[in-house]
Amino acid sequence: MDKQKPEYLRPALIAGAIAGVLSGLPFVSAGNCLCCLWIVGGAAIATKLLAKNTSKILTSGDGALVGALTGIVAAVVDTIVKIPLQPYNMALARRIIDKVSEFGTEMPAGLDGLLEGGSGILSPGWLLLGLFISAAVFAVMGVLGGIIGVSLFAKKKPQASPPAATPPLPGPGDAA
C-alpha cells in the first residue's frame, strides 16, 4: 500500500486562483449564484489536478481537503480582485438606484448618505471580516466540490476478478 501523501497545495493554488478571479470579477461573479459554481467547479478541477499528479487512489477526505484549501485560496484572491473594483461597484449601485428612482419609487431617506460614506476604501476591519466570511463559505463549498471531483476524476480501486468458474464434476447421470 502506498503511504505517500499527495501534494494538496499546488492544485489548490492553481484552481483557487482561477476560481477567485472568476468570483471577484463583476458580472462573471454571478456564476456563484448558481450553487457557488466557480468555487465548486474550482475545487473539482483541483481534485482532477491532484488525481493526475499522484499515483495514490484518492479518498473523499483527500477531495475534501484539497477542496477546502481551494476555497480558502479563492476567498483571498476574490478579496484582492474586489479591492480595486470597489469604486466601480459603488458607481454601479448609484446608477441602479438612479434608474429605480426614475420610475417614481421613493428611496429611503439615508440612502444617499450611505452611498457617499461607502464610496471610499473599505476599512481594514470590514475587509478582514468579509474575507473571513468568504473563506468560511468558500471552504465549505470547496469541500463539496472536492468530494464531487473525487467521484468524477479519481482513479478507481482495481476490482478483484471473480474466481474462475470450475467445471462441474461428472456425476452418475453424466455418463455417455
Image: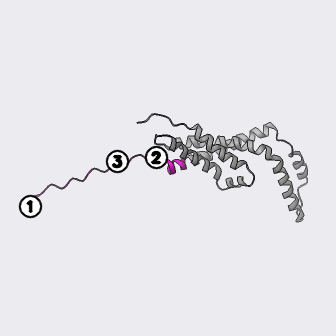
In this rendering, the label closer to the viewer, 2 or 1: 2
Badge 2 element? loop
Quadrant for the N terminus, please: top left
Question: Which percent across, then down, holds residue 7?
Answer: 54, 36
Tag 1: amino acid: Ala
For marks 3 and 2, the one nearer the N-term is 2
Answer whether residue 36 is visible to the viewer in this image: no
Tag 3: amino acid: Ala
How far apart marks 3 and 2 lie (CA) works out to 15 Å
Answer yes or no: do the residues labelled 3 and 1 have beta carbons within 8 Å?
no
Instruction: Decide whether residue 157 is among the magenta residues.
Output: yes
User: What's the residue at 10%, 62% (across, down)?
Assistant: 173
Tag 2: amino acid: Lys
Crowding at dot 1, Cα within 10 Å, few <14 / some 14-19 / many 20+, comes out as few
Location of residue 102 (image quadrant) = bottom right
Q: Give the magenta range.
A: 147-176
Badge 3 element? loop
Q: Which residue is mark 3?
A: 160
- 14 vs 61, left or right, is right
Q: Which residue is mark 1?
A: 175
Query: Residue 105, relative to residue 62: is it above or below?
Result: below
- Report the colour scheme: one colour
